[in-house]
Amino acid sequence: MLFSFKPKPLVVHCIVSEEMSHVYDYAPIQAANKFFPAWWKASPKTTIDWEETNLQQSIKNCQGIQDHYAHGMIMPMWTELAISTNGTGGIVSQFSDGISTNDYQPVDLRAGFRPDAITLAL
């Protein structure tokens, strides 16, 4: 007996407040393969140096990036965002739409994970 299991389509429900409804209209979630960045397209392909028997791999071999663009989804930024550091490990930010907000995780909440970076939450 043969079984045939067809994959079910993925359904993503986006719930936004009335105040933020412009986000859904302006920047709907779409397949990630519609958003290949220019740097990715310009990246060199993997080459093989046959004389040295050496494989010169590039970022295009990264399985995580390949999977993301093959199966992932992206919600494009719906407004302009200016970010600067405040000199004490935090950020100062301003959205052009005057409605959107963001926050960041301070270093003490990240418990040693990337103490040199700032993690944003939009």
Image: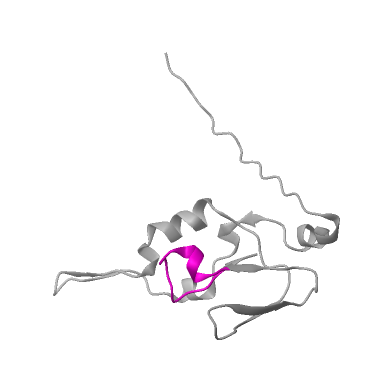
Check the image and name the residue furthest to the left: 52
Residue drawn 46% across the image and 20% down it: 3
Give above or below for 106 relative to 65: below
Give above or below for 29 relative to 106: above
> Residue 64: horizontal and vertical position, in percent?
42, 57
Give above or below for 55 relative to 14: below
Residue drawn 80% across the image and 74% down it: 98
Check the image and name the residue furthest to the bottom: 87
Residue 6 lies left or right of residue 81; in this view the side is left
Residue drawn 14% across the image and 74% down it: 52
Q: Which residues are magenta?
A: 105-119
Residue 54 lies left or right of residue 104; in this view the side is left
Magenta region, mostly helix, strand or loop?
Answer: loop
> Residue 122: horizontal and vertical position, in percent?
65, 64
Residue 9 lies left or right of residue 107; in this view the side is right
Residue drawn 52% across the image and 50% down it: 71
Q: Residue 32 or 21: which is nearer the viewer?
A: 21
Check the image and name the residue furthest to the top: 1
In magenta segment, residue 114: yes
Give above or below for 88 relative to 98: below
Image quadrant assignment for residue 95 = bottom right
Image quadrant assignment for residue 58 = bottom left
